[in-house]
Amino acid sequence: MNPHEAPIIVGLDIGTTKIAAIAGRKNEYDKLEILGFGRANSNGVQHGQVLNIDQTIKGIQAALANCAASNPDLEINEVYVGVAGHHIKSLQTRGDIVRQNPDTEIEQWEVDQLVENQRKTFIPAGDQIIDVIPQEFHVDNNHNIVVPVGVNGVKLGANFHIITGDRNAIRNINRAVERSGLKTKDLVLQPLASASAVMSDIDLEAGVAILDIGGGTSDLAIFCEGILKHTAVIPFGGENITNDIKTGLGVLKIQAEQMKIQFGSALVNETKSNAVITIPGLKGMPAKEISVQNLAHIIQARMTEILEFVTYHLKQVELDTRALSGGIILTGGGSQLMHLKQLTEYVTGLSARIGFPNEHLAANHIEELTKPMYSTCIGLILKGYNDFEHKRKEFESKYPKVEVPENFKKEGKGIISDQVIKEERLKAPKRKKLSSVWDMFKDGLIDVFKEEPDKVLK
């Protein structure tokens, strides 16, 4: 793919602890070149849901200002946004259509019509369909067809995985994005975005579970026999661990976060029994000594709870270690906890590894973006390219020529700080209004506007 014949796609990850915006475009080797990157602290999101719209808008604008400062040639109008939160639910359905002309091969528009028909599925009042994901197709008496286009038959059908979310939660994300001067190109379930960034075709064939441990939630996607079998949002994440440490050890939240990152372990047995952490006292109070083992006890208890939820969901879909020979891929900021891989293997009985979002990145990327906390954002860009390559949405026919900035190449120098400086906001180019572009989408756009992604551990 010629890089100047491909759109620039922006992923916006609105998490509990951070908001990240990454702009990327595929090169001639079908790899992502990162053209812009900005992040900021998130204060308006809790457990994957936008509760304070004004604070969320400030975070989005700060991340966008950072992204604009990293590459002045970049203009951001539309974004792919991740959605998570404990309100996310999923259900399995089955549908089929009788073809108008059974003597011809199945065409893509017929598959699209079958998928669109599932959007009429009855769901509880107050919920909204976020995505309809086909699993295996069947044509007449032929089952387990992966790609039905080109097959002959009278009746086309499929099993579907339908993802729903609370209408008000989705509306809050929509408001925050729109008031930030952007339009939502599409809403993507966060664990599916993360999975696309860290999972290979081999993982998909082998069977694998993706666990994205964020700040407010831990998101699970289970793949088996090449298809998505199950998704779930577990309402615990890194923020819960931090709060447990704060309460259990009687320290400030910022101290709890720092101890978790620097000294935290998910396994008590891997810590030294006599190791202590000394933290300064408050306002003349004596310094406090914290046992590293006590810290690990707290972290292990909460992480075990999260992993037991994973085991529960695996049993719900009747999958075990034989079905998931690819094991569990841990990603998200929370996956960076020491010894988490070992704890995961002990609790679930599955092999585990850390998933880094470098599978699809061009060779000259900066190391910062290969951290697990950016898996969702990279995956959102990949989702955009999947839409573009399959013509699922309309894109402009001409794309601006934007080069990869020098500060985004290997050494990683010049990465924009988390804290946006006022001068950077003033220098950031004004974004154009998108009404003219969005007039093109009219009926074709999915009416649903996303919910926020989960927060990640730093």
Image (cartoon, rainbow, N blue to C red):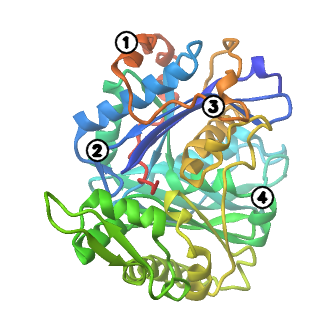
Disc 3: which residue: 413
Q: Secondary structure at mark 3?
A: loop
Q: Amino acid at mark 2?
A: Asn
Give the mark toward the camera: 4 or 1.
1
Residue 366 lies, with reference to residue 256, above or below; the image says above
Residue 142 lies, with reference to residue 169, above or below; the image says below
Circle 3 crowding by C-alpha within 10 Å: few under 14, some 14–19, many from 20: few
Res 390 → quadrant = top right
Which residue: 53% across, 89% down? Answer: 269
Q: Earlier in the sequence, mark 4 or mark 1?
A: 4
Disc 1: which residue: 426
Q: Earlier in the sequence, mark 3 or mark 2?
A: 2
Q: Earlier in the sequence, mark 4 or mark 3?
A: 4
Circle 2 crowding by C-alpha within 10 Å: few under 14, some 14–19, many from 20: many
Residue 158 lies, with reference to residue 271, above or below; the image says above
Disc 2: which residue: 43
Which residue: 38% across, 72% down? Answer: 277
Regarding residue 378, the answer to whether it shows in the image is: yes
Query: In the image, residue 268 lies at what x, y percent?
Result: 48, 86
How far is mark 3 from mark 1, CA to CA?
22 Å
Q: Amino acid at mark 3?
A: Lys
Q: Earlier in the sequence, mark 1 or mark 2?
A: 2
Regarding residue 240, the answer to whether it shows in the image is: no
